Amino acid sequence: MTVSKFASPSLAGLGNQLALVAIIGMLSYAFVDQIYFGELPCPLCLMQRMGFVIIGFALVLNIRCGAHSAHYGWGIIGGLVGMMVSLRQVLLHILPGDKGFGATFLELHFYTWAFVGYVGLIAGLAILLMLPNRDVRSRSLIANILVISFITIVFANLVSTLLECGIGPCADDPVQYDGWIWLCNRFGF
């Protein structure tokens, strides 16, 4: 099978690309909130981002290498892990009078939105896995932009996490970039 740069994607291909757009959107919004609003992610927030990254890499594998049940399986496992972490954080702040951790978006905290996102993505991956047309490989301009955008946002999150936590454990309630402070002290910036 040859992959055309101009062919429109199949329904499964479109679903994989739209799911990747959702992942890029969620990771980008969290990253902008961190950089622009100064809201440093807690360790549970970082683990939720890792769940989205695992799902994103499974989608990239589908888009680049073709649909495979193992790719969907990794995406579902990443979604389940992220969903458990976000549910844990929801349950930590469920008591009446608890203001929760971090800012809200449309009256819900980001970890609550993460839980909703994981439920939707897991359901979407399950549906994509059941579609008969598994022709999802794409080298189109849109697919290339999505893959490059995803890799870029993952790399940016990795760098920001290293600057926030350094090479040790992250602070439970981070208020500064400990890794950056360590670098400045170590190399005299």
Image (cartoon, rainbow, N blue to C red):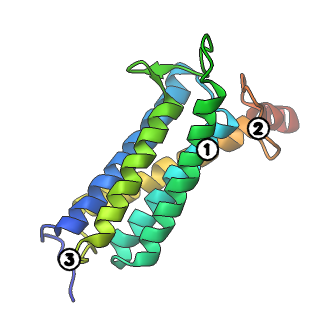
Residue placed most toward the observer, 120 or 20 = 120
Above or below, 167 relative to 91: below
Q: Which residue is mark 1?
A: 85
Q: Which residue is mark 2?
A: 170
> What amino acid is labelled 3 in the image?
Asn
| Horizontal arrangement in the rendering, residue 1 relative to residue 95 (left or right) | left
Mark closer to the observer (3, 2): 3
Residue 176 in the image: x percent, y percent? Answer: 72, 24
Residue placed most toward the observer, 10 or 121 = 121
Mark closer to the observer (2, 1): 1
Judge the density around disc 2: few (<14), some (14-19), many (≥20) Cα neighbours within 10 Å: many
Quadrant (top left, top right, bottom left, bottom right) of the C terminus: top right
Residue shown at the point (32%, 49%) measured from the top left: 21
* C-alpha distance separating marks 2 and 1: 16 Å
* C-alpha distance separating marks 3 and 2: 44 Å
Residue 24 in the image: x percent, y percent? Answer: 39, 47
> What amino acid is labelled 1 in the image?
Val
> What amino acid is labelled 2 in the image?
Cys
* C-alpha distance separating marks 1 and 3: 33 Å
Above or below, 150 relative to 98: below
Judge the density around disc 1: few (<14), some (14-19), many (≥20) Cα neighbours within 10 Å: many
| Horizontal arrangement in the rendering, residue 172 relative to residue 40 (left or right) | right
Q: Which residue is mark 3?
A: 133
Above or below, 81 relative to 46: below
